[in-house]
Image (cartoon, rainbow, N blue to C red):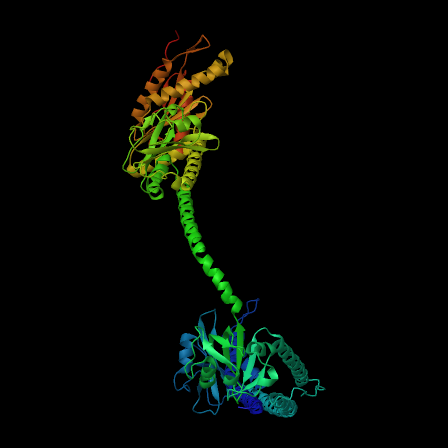
Amino acid sequence: MRIKSLIILSMTSAAALIGLVGGLAIVTQMAVTKSLGLTEATNVAQELADTIVFKSSDGSPSLFERPDALREFLELQHHRSLRDFLVVDPNKILLAHAADEEHELGEKFDHDPGNEVGQTLADGVPRKFSDPNEANDILAVPIEHPKDTIVGAVLLEYDPLLRAAEQRTNNVLWLVGLAAAAAILVAAAFAWGLLSRFGAGLSDMMRGMESLAKGEAMTRISHGRKDEFGQLARGFNTMADELATARAHIEDIVQTAAEGIAVLNSDGKIASVNPAAAAMIGRRADKIVGLDWGAVMTMRDSRGAEFAAGTSPVEQALTTGRQHQSEVRLTKSDGSHVPVIASCSPLSRSDGGLVLTLSDISELRRAEGVVNERADQLALLNRELHEKSETTTRLVKLGELLQACVTFPEAFSVVGTAMAEFLGGLSGTVHLTSASRNLVEEMAHWGDVRSSATQFAPEDCWALRRGQEHVAGPGMLTPRCAHITENGKKGYVCMPLAAQGETLGILHLCEPNAAEKPQWLAERQQILRGVVDTLALALANLRLRETLRQQSIRDPNTGLFNRRYLEETSSRELRRMERSGQPLVVIMLDVDHFKQFNDTFGHEAGDLVLKQVAATLIEHARDSDVVSRYGGEEFALVMPGSSVHEGAERAEALRQAIRKLHLTHRGRTLGTVTASFGVAAYPEHGVGWTELTNAADHALYDAKGNGRDRVAIALGNAPGERPPIQLVPAPKSS
């Protein structure tokens, strides 16, 4: 569909839409009129009903209670609004009316065919109905006094209000109709003006485009207009200038291009060639234009064989009209051959033809010879790099696995599995030096041969003595290490595991057939170095992490767990006991008169007392118990699964053991060491860690307050629980 037709259709649709909107407005207004008439009549009747039952503040009766005054009030309303009014009681008996000659006071109102007045008196909903004896409709509205109590109803004529609303509606409808007609006229005038301007501008644009399509490159459009068509005309002229410039640039590119370019018509005759194509053919350009391409150039396939009839790329492109490209040998006029890539691209114009592009690849073929010579070398290097890359990847994976280990057993499990993959055919072990530096112990083993002792002294290994790898085997003058268990034809190497300035142990490898494989170690030297460095660094990090972990949870003076570790572990144990329904005991103890040891004998003696008390606690503790230094000279012992009486017995045993300590410092006897104990148990003395420690602390304070060197049990939670008991009386001073 043309643009002009679209504009006419759009304007017609707009006019129709305006008419539709006007019609909808008329229909809507008529519906609203009836609704407004009913609403207004209901409001008037409701105000009248409210006035009838209104009582003033001085206590005077309402109009509803004064029939004469009510009738006078209705007469006044009738004269004002020119409509009839009636008032009935709950039994539909007429109490008062205005200008209604058909009804008598005191009679029952029965002009509602559907008993609409009775329904309104029953449910309080206003209703409209038609009186058979009247021409107008009547509206019934309830009278309520007090609120929600219906004492009667007001009846009034409904039609006068409706007529007033209809008159207002007619006025609005006239305005809507006039506005719609005016809008249609304005739309028609605007459409005519728009079509006039659009048609003139569009005609200019069409004429310009047709001229440009015919090849008239100098075609331009007048751009004196100030509207959008003027902007389009200026854009068109700019585009025509750019096309002319681009055409000139393309011609320059074609003439200076290194590739040969020839244009052939649909008959296969040469229409034009650039200098590069003429040079490849070996003839002048002006001598070959107009000749058949087959008479000017001879093409053979890439192997030098002649093309079958119709199979050359030029013939296929001319026949099928599709692009073809292939490598050919072009025979020049002097008989020489040039390898070229011939690309034939059909032209999209109506008379057909194609563009033949010839790319000389002589240098490329010579370069291919050099590339082929290096191909084998590159393949060999690639295989070596691939092997190194795989080795590096495995080393990185081994390092990641070792770094993820949190304990030495985990790390050595990874090593035992990974070494068989890294060092296929070799058996070996990893030995770790003990913390005391006097023993080297096997931690991991792989392979079928075990050539080293599982434990030996550091001086038994030459690698640990010299701090560098030590190799021994058949035909070698180097001494064999003392930890080697056989002296046959097997060869071995011991490599120190050193990291962060510390020698952690050795990596020991054994080759059972060393006599037949003199290069067994040289072939693996590089990967061995990577494995040793990775393993040493991982073990050093593990040892450092273990040291830091112990420092974070241990008291450096006594070697016991610290308070932070106690609280974390005990809270977890408490939850476990709660789930399993078992008891738990907390014992708090404090060294009596500890300040006197420091003041009398010095802080070194005080530290000795703390260490000996800690050793006594460890000696009497079970594997499941948690012993910690709580702070200063105060200690704590947590006993999962023990009752309060078992805790008291353990505390008494500890008290007696501490009392039996005989300590001397620098030749001086430190005297008798005593301690006071407080015992609390879950669930008797609390269900939370804080409650239990507070209960044990209070019992400890009671033990100290009652003379020290004794055990006290905390108060129970139940009412009437006995006070802390003293299990052991304070000993008499000796």
Q: Quadrant of the C terminus?
A: top left
Indicate the quadrant where residue 708 lies.
top left
Q: Is residue 720 above or below residue 198?
A: above
- Residue 110 quadrant: bottom left
540 to 371, vertically: above or below: above
> Relative to the observer, which residue lies in front, 416 or 79?
416
* Residue 726 appears in view: no
Whole-percent x, y for residue 498 in the image? 44, 32
What is the x, y in percent for residue 337? 50, 74
Compared across the picture, whether 38 is left or right of 734 comes to right
In the image shown, does 647 or 635 lie closer to the viewer? 635
Q: Position of residue 302 (x, y in %)?
A: 45, 73
Q: Is residue 252 visible?
A: yes
Nearest the eye: 394 or 661: 394
Name of the residue lying farthest toward the left: 448
Q: Is residue 385 above or below residue 320?
A: above
Q: Viewed as shown, does residue 262 lie left or right of 670? A: right
Q: Tell which residue pokes out farthest to the front in this image.
A: 334
Q: Where in the figure is residue 554, as x and y percent of width and height?
A: 43, 28
Residue drawn at x 44%, y 34% as measured from the top left = 540
Q: Nearer the viewer, residue 183 or 252?
A: 252
